Image: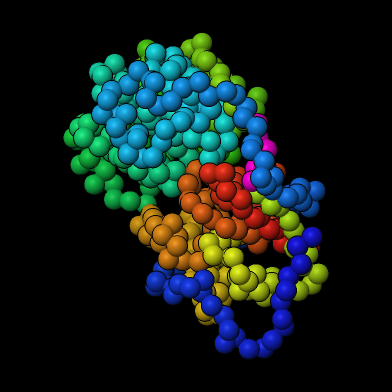
Amino acid sequence: MYRSRRSFSNSRSNHRGGNNRRPGRFSRGRGRRGKNGSFDPSMLIKKAVRDVAPKPTCVVENKFVDFAISDQLKHNIVARGYEDPTPIQDQIIPHVLEGRDVVGLANTGTGKTAAFLVPLIDNIYQRKSKKVLIMAPTRELAVQIESELRLFTRGMRINSSLCIGGASINRQIDSLRRNPEFVIGTPGRLIDLEKRRFLDFNSFSTIVLDEVDRMFDMGFIHDMKYVIARLPQDRHSLFFSATLPRKLDEVVNSFSTNPIKIEVETQKASTNVDQDVIKINGQSKVDLLDDLLNQEGFNKVLVFGRTKRGLDKLDRTLYKRGFSVAAIHGNKSQSQRQRVLKQFKKSNIQVLLATDIASRGLDIDDVTHVINYDLPQTKDDYIHRIGRTGRANKTGIALSFVD
């Protein structure tokens, strides 16, 4: 068990903000109290596997230059610093280039975004397909997908429209009027635009459903079925999920035709993450967190809480104690959330407080620690949370407060 080195002093003069000053305050929303956490990670205490190369789940046979894609796209991939594809990219890209339907099962952080973007960009560029619709469960994941798309399509005259809640719908309508090749969005906003007749699902030749298990968990099953029912029968369909429970079989069967199923990793905690628990034993969780954040090495820390209201309170408390901290959750506007994420990515903020809205899909480099201030509901949520650290073959630390 991880042991805190807290010195219970009444003085607050030594609190620091990770060598960063807080860049400014953000407006706070109110949230309803959620359910108590039910998953105890104590049984998952383990040390990361260090100095041992991870065993690949498959042999990577190609380099990006080997794929039958345009030279301009290859140039953009190299400019991103990519040379060797990940296992899921190596297996999926050839099938998508051929127009095959694909069901891809992979954890977050395995490179699945590029696995579908690279071949779809080339298909658009080579005029093998007309328009692509990509649906993601959260605004942050949709923003990330579009950001990657823009980098991969430099100099290729391929346009995109980002359609998410919390952002100006009028700007999104203007963007759709330009008839972009890619439309990326969240279910609610996409359906809203379709009902207003600014978006026609039948006009898309390719559809991607990303993190479908998460969309199911968030209650988007009826939205998914609504969109699928309005897609053209003759289409190219890609389906990505960390797991494929039986409850999603109906969606898969109605969504794809004789799909290639590719699974490169199982749903398990990262081998690159030290996992430990901190016993509260009646102590103040805020004081324990305070102690941790003042210790050496806690440079870029993602703290997960259960409720929006609880995180706002913790945000105010840590700020008063001198930490550079900000919070993201569903009551924050999209511009606020994106500004905070940008500052955290640049390490201008030491501590990012988040509800589970940030536990999937976010690709943030060099997160040193994930702290479960409130326990997650399920093991899957726990795995997704701690997957924010220990990325790109680096070692991270995950700590969970338990009673």
Closer to us: 164 or 368:
368
Residue 166 seen anywhere in this rendered image of the structure? yes
User: Is residue 372 a member of the stretch shown in magenta?
Assistant: no
Measured as percent of width and height from the top left, residue 103 is found at 52, 22
Judge whether 174 appears above or below 35 on screen: above
373 sits to left or right of 347 = right
Residue 251 seen anywhere in this rendered image of the structure? no
Judge whether 147 appears above or below 124 on screen: below
Q: Quadrant of residue 196?
A: top left
Measured as percent of width and height from the top left, residue 313 is found at 56, 71
Closer to us: 169 or 293:
293
Q: Residue at x 52, y 15 (%)?
A: 260
Measured as percent of width and height from the top left, residue 375 is found at 69, 55
The quadrant in which the C terminus is found is bottom right
Q: Residue at x 64, y 55 (%)?
A: 397
* Magenta span: chief secondary structure: loop
130 sits to left or right of 236 = left
Q: Is the image coloured rainbow, by chain, by secondary structure, or in one colour?
A: rainbow
Q: Quadrant of residue 34?
A: bottom right
Closer to us: 351 or 256:
351
Measured as percent of width and height from the top left, residue 367 is found at 54, 55
Q: Range of the magenta residues?
A: 266-272
The quadrant in which the N terminus is found is bottom right
Q: Residue at x 42, y 46 (%)?
A: 139
Total marks shown come to 0
Judge whether 174 appears above or below 157 on screen: below
Q: Residue at x 65, y 62 (%)?
A: 373
Closer to us: 26 or 369:
369
